[in-house]
Image: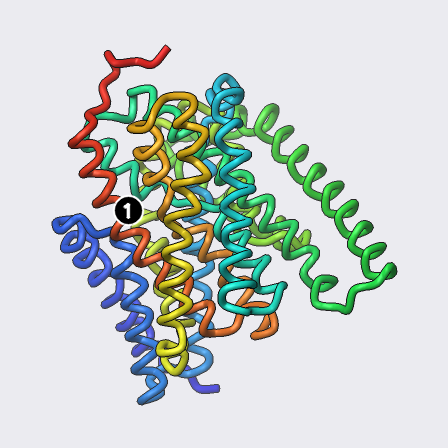
């Protein structure tokens, strides 16, 4: 298949510049930039369906950029995770987190299976996506209000980190089981599912152990060596290169690039100096991460948009209710109504991990995720990521959070 490299390079260069402009414009009106990136992808898909401007080989190049964007997204999620700090706060945060995962997933399944009438396999995929959150959308509002160091801000970050870890693990387990879930039920299938779960647990334990050993015994000497090279090398490029290798190894082990990238971020999160240098990772993050959301938008089927409006509205309403109740109720008992509303609403946005789950389901076929349900979840991402931060800002204005007001 002939590929016009000149056209593809022009398109990629234009998108890079456009991504930065859209990010700047949307931040001025307090709209998350990922909303703009998703819409860019939708427009590209529309024009592609109408005029066929991108060849199949060109689409593969965009798919590669989307995968690199996925790696940078999940790598940053892992890099920003503070496992040592999380372990210290595990007791209080886990009480909220367990209810969050169970109730959010249950609400998602009920909405998809019983209300929308989708197949139960699709309901499970939607439920898994519902357990995830994108607290980074709300954190920007908390940072602007100087509230992250307040007790509620610290609890929010702890719950969100647990959410990220559990969502990534549940995603890996779900797609390991998915081939069996599509079969007819029976004792033989349950036996295969049990075997699959056992193999999965062994593999993820082994992969996690290898990452831990690398982090504990290899990462520090290796990065020290590269930092001492003459002339000095850019340390973050070494970190990113290793992250790509770990992500690819995870995909080779039948997990996914997302799982590997997340674990790669965790490998370097324990290195205080690596985390301090995380700012130098941001240009790479800003370059590639938009292409993941553009790729999501390019998977939106324009023909299915009309049929996605009703399920999108239903799922968006349930997405709000699920997190507010799942996170808010235990926090209400622990810290009161204002804390419950603040933390519950801050956990509402669904973006990176939720869309990774839905896209993987879409790639399996319509039996797993029909186009209209995928489009509906894109609507959920857009609505939750626009409305939730606005509401959080209003709540923080009403109930300012300060470090001096530390809860005991």
At x 43%, y 24%, the residue is 333
Residue 324 vs residue 127, the one in the foreground: 324
* Residue 65: % across, % down: 41, 62
At x 52%, y 25%, the residue is 220
* Residue 7: % across, % down: 30, 78
Is disc 1 surrounded by few (<14), some (14 to 19) or many (20+) residues within 10 Å? Answer: some
Measured along the vertical axis of the image, is residue 220 above or below residue 311?
above
At x 58%, y 51%, the residue is 171
Q: Is residue 88 left or right of residue 216?
A: left
Residue at image mark 1: 388
Any part of residue 403 in sight: yes
* Residue 360: % across, % down: 54, 62
Measured along the vertical axis of the image, is residue 317 above or below residue 269?
below
Tally of numbered discs: 1
Residue 119 vs residue 177, the one in the foreground: 119
Measured along the vertical axis of the image, is residue 217 above or below residue 316?
above
């Amino acid at each position: 298949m002939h590929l016009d490299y000149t056209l593809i390079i022009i398109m990629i260069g234009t998108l890079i510049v456009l991504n930065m402009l859209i990010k700047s414009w949307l931040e001025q009106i307090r709209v998350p930039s990922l909303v703009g990136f998703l819409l860019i992808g939708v427009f590209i898909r529309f024009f592609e369906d109408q005029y066929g401007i991108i060849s199949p080989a060109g689409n593969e190049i965009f798919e590669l950029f989307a995968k690199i964007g996925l790696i940078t997204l999940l790598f940053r999620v892992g890099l920003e995770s503070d496992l040592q700090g999380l372990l210290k706060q595990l007791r209080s945060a886990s009480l909220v987190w367990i209810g969050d995962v169970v109730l959010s997933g249950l609400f998602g399944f009920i909405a998809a299976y019983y209300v929308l009438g989708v197949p139960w396999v699709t309901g499970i995929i939607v439920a898994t996506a519902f357990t995830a959150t994108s607290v980074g959308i709300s954190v920007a509002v908390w940072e602007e209000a100087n509230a992250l160091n307040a007790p509620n801000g610290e609890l929010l970050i702890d719950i969100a980190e647990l959410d990220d870890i559990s969502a990534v693990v549940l995603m890996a387990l779900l797609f390991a089981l998915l081939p069996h879930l599509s079969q007819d039920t029976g004792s033989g299938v349950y036996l295969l599912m049990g075997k699959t779960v056992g193999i999965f647990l062994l593999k993820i334990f082994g992969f996690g152990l290898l990452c831990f050993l690398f982090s504990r015994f290899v990462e520090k000497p290796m990065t020290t060596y590269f930092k001492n090279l003459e002339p000095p090398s850019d340390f973050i490029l070494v970190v990113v290169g290793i992250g790509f290798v770990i992500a690819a190894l995870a995909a080779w082990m039948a997990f996914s690039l997302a799982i590997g990238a997340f674990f790669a971020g965790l490998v370097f999160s324990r290195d205080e100096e690596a985390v301090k240098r995380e700012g130098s990772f941001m240009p790479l993050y800003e370059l590639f991460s938009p292409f993941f959301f553009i790729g999501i938008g390019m998977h939106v089927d324009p023909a299915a948009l009309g049929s996605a409006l009703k399920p999108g509205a239903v799922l968006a309403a349930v997405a709000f209710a699920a997190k507010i109740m799942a996170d808010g109720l235990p926090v209400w008992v622990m810290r009161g109504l204002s804390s419950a509303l603040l933390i519950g609403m801050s956990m509402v946005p669904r973006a990176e991990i939720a869309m990774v789950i839905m896209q993987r389901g879409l790639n399996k076929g319509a039996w797993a995720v029909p186009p209209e349900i995928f489009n509906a979840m894109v609507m959920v991402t857009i609505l939750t990521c626009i409305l939730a931060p606005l509401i959080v800002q209003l709540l923080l204005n009403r109930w300012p959070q300060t470090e001096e007001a530390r809860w005991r």
